[in-house]
Image: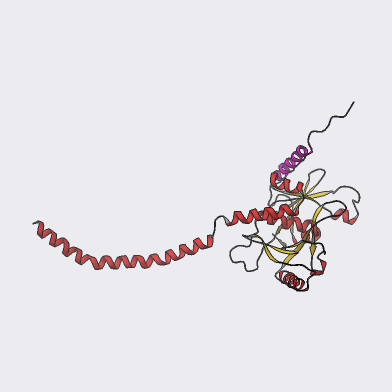
Amino acid sequence: MKFLRMKPGHGEVLLTEGDPSVREDEERLVEAFRRQLDEGMWAAVPETESHSGRRQARMVKSYAEIPAEAERVIFFPRAAGG
Amino acid sequence: MVLALLVLAIVAAGLAAPVAVRAFERHRAQRKPRQARRRRELRDLGDPGRERRAEQRARELLRSCVNEEEWAMYRDLGFIRVFGRMTRKAGRDAGSSSAYAYLIYPHKPIVAYVAKTGRLLSEYCVEFPDLTGAISQSRLPDSDDVLAKWMALTGDEERLIRNANMHLPGRQVDPSRVRRDLWRLSEWERQRRGPLKAPRT
């Protein structure tokens, strides 16, 4: 699983990656996830709806909400009224 | 006579030399901060290709997330349409196609409209400013801004709309431009569908 973050002037940046089934990797992923949310990021997992095939994103608010089959989580700044 | 002029010139040069050296040193001293400032400005401007490469990366990420039609729409028309799902979720319009849709433009408000008639409903002004450690730049590349809106709309439409500032159509995006874009979109979809087959008689 890869953690990507949108960054001004850079495009996406790879924060960390690892296999959630490996304990050390999971700890690192949990820590990175928490840090991003503390910095005010939103997290989304791109996915394909099973019955319609529609592409969409799943917003996740905790590490536990990340689907097991997710290959990447994208962090982006939280929305603010413009 | 010539010798006298030569001696005079040497004496004059000798007298003027210290003044010239002092003026040169003063000029150099004044130039130093100017040069340092210029160097700092050039460093701040950075690599001129950086923005372009960032946008290229952002486009690739967007392409990998949205479906083929949405990607083609963005590539060809410069915006993405996303159908709204709140009414369907509430069950008021269950079973039918979406009653409304959004147009997502890069770094412009999201425009909501009635899908069937094209009547403009509202503008949702929303930004994704990255303020962590940002000194000079907090603005995402265009395609990242579109992807952020797409993810937030398809993932949690209600939360995004709650965070946005809602305005009547025309506050920031010219309604005639939106109507023209809706027409471009319908033409684009018609062309993608291809010519309709004539019914057999």
- Identify which residue, B82 or B117, lies in the foreground: B82
B27 falls in the magenta region:
no
Q: Residue B26 at what x, y percent from top left?
A: 33, 67
Q: Residue B58 at what x, y percent from top left?
A: 67, 55
Which residue is depicted at the point 65% across and 68% down? B132
- Residue A62 visible in the picture: no
Q: Residue B188 at what x, y percent from top left?
A: 74, 40
Which residue is the extreme one toward the front? A22
- Residue B71 visible in the picture: yes
Taken as a whole, is the magenta stretch helix, strand or loop? helix
The answer to which quarter of the image holds residue A4 is: bottom right
Q: Is residue B40 left or right of residue B169?
A: left
Q: Residue B168 at what x, y percent from top left?
A: 74, 52
Q: Quadrant of the N terminus of chain A?
A: bottom right
Q: Is residue B4 left or right of residue A30?
A: left
Specify the segment rendered in magenta: B172-201
Which residue is depicted at the point 53% across and 60% down? B45
- Identify which residue, B41 or B72, lies in the foreground: B72
- Identify which residue, B139 or A31, lies in the foreground: A31
Q: Quadrant of the C terminus of chain A?
A: bottom right
Q: Is residue A2 left or right of residue B86?
A: left
The answer to which quarter of the image holds residue B199 is: top right
Q: Is residue A71 left or right of residue B49?
A: right
